[in-house]
Amino acid sequence: MSARLHLTTAPPRLNDEAYPSFVVSSFQKVVTALDRTWHPEHFFCAQCGAFFGPEGFHEKDGKAYCRKDYFDMFAPKCGGCARAILENYISALNTLWHPECFVCRECFTPFINGSFFEHDGQPYCEVHYHEHRGSLCSGCQKPITGRCITAMAKKFHPEHFVCAFCLKQLNKGTFKEQNDKPYCQNCFLKLFC
């Protein structure tokens, strides 16, 4: 809840009974807020101690806070930057995001068509999602969504599992490996034997 300060001038008042002979003879400024009356110098942010300016204060559980502290402490936080969300937001992956923060966590590209992939609770573009899952083709660096060949602890589209020298398509089990590269039987014999 946002509120404005109400600054009034109080009439002269008598001090309490402990000092019956002393009378305050001048007017004092007071602040009326939160169903109480305050000296202006005693009405400040419960978190940082700053006095309230023209923007007023925000109240939570009977305490007054400056705008910054109120939103830092009580506003929902963005899943991308962890700052308070004050205006427009996107709700995805069970959290809220500033629109500019809802991007691929790897390349920071926005999701133009609204389509994204989730991995470990974070949004990714298709390429980086497959990279994190280990499902990018080692030959073309594009996602593998259908059949694949797993060889040399890597994954390939079948058409991209080729001899490193002659580029002939290989079959799993019918190749030789040298320096982490696959070779057909003929090229391997020519180059390394």
Image: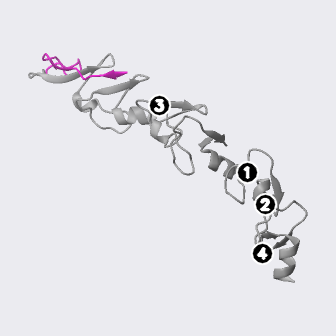
Q: Mark 1 points at which residue?
A: 135
Whichever of callouts 2 and 4 sits on the residue coming sooner in the sequence is 2
Classify mark 2: helix, strand or loop: loop
Direction from residue 126 to residue 149 in the image, left or right: right
Whichever of callouts 4 and 3 sits on the residue coming sooner in the sequence is 3
How many angstroms separate mark 1 from mark 2 (CA)?
A: 14 Å
Disc 4 and disc 3 in contact, CB within 8 angstroms:
no
Which quadrant of the figure contains the C terminus? Answer: bottom right
Percent of width and height locating residue 22 = 14, 22
Q: Name the residue under label 4.
A: 179
**What's drawn in magenta, residue-wise?**
1-22
Q: Bin the neighbour count of mark 1 within 10 Å (Cα to Cα): few under 14, some 14-19, many 20 and up.
A: many
Foreground: 145 or 120?
Answer: 145
How many angstroms separate mark 3 from mark 1 (CA)?
A: 31 Å
1 or 2: mark nearer the eye: 2
Q: At x 33% / y 19%, what residue is drawn?
A: 34
Q: Is residue 83 above or below residue 190?
A: above
